[in-house]
Image (cartoon, rainbow, N blue to C red):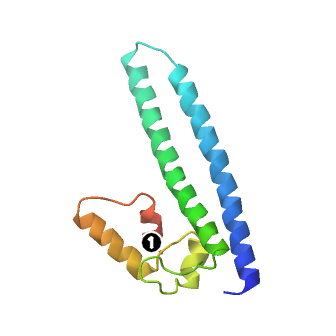
Amino acid sequence: MDAIRIKNVRKRLADEQDLLLKSLERSQLAADEIKLEKTEDEGDLASISHDRDVLYSLHEGGFVRLQMIQKAIEAIDGGQYGVCIRCEGVINDKRLDAVPWAAMCIACQEETEAEHASSGMSLIGADAEAEL
């Protein structure tokens, strides 16, 4: 991968990282506001519980993606960007264009997901990558 493309990918990852950090901060503020609400109405309690669950899921998914982005930036800095962490093969450029934080080639990603699915586990955030 040429230096200009690497520079552009790193900027894209850094921008995505900044957006995620801001989003996670907003989610935390919203969760803090929900914690402050006190009510004895069962409907309100159910709504508050649902809102907390939704915010937790968004926060968790965003945090996982943030970790993946940070690992991709580290891979760029270490000269390993675009190399599958499982088979050490080259990750397709189209895949990296769509998911610049992808750590595995499509074949290894699919194998990993199949292994986790057969064991009853699922990968957080991997669903979006599997479509690529």
Q: Residue at position x 50%, y 72% from top?
A: 103
Q: Label 1 amino acid?
A: Glu
Point out the image quarter for the N terminus.
Answer: bottom right
Can you tell which quarter of the image residue 100 is in?
Answer: bottom right
Tag 1, which secondary structure? loop
Compared across the picture, whether 25 is left or right of 125 comes to: right
Residue 39 to residue 1: above or below: above
Q: In this view, does 112 lie above or below 70?
A: below
- What residue sits right under mark 1 in the picture? 131
Q: Residue 45 versus residue 91: which sits nearer the camera?
A: 91
The image shows residue 123 at horizontal and vertical percentages of: 38, 60
Whether 48 is drawn above or below 101: the answer is above
Residue at the limit of the structure toward the front, as seen here: 78
Question: Residue at point 52% right, 83% down?
Answer: 91
Give x and y (percent) for residue 102. Answer: 52, 71
Q: Is 122 on the left-hand or right-hand side of 34? A: left
Residue in the picture at 29% in, 58% down: 121
x, y (%) of residue 106? 44, 79
Q: In which quarter of the image is residue 79?
A: bottom right
- Looking at the image, which residue sits at the far top? 40
Front residue of 24 and 39: 24
Q: Where is residue 34 in the image (x, y as percent from the top left)?
A: 53, 26
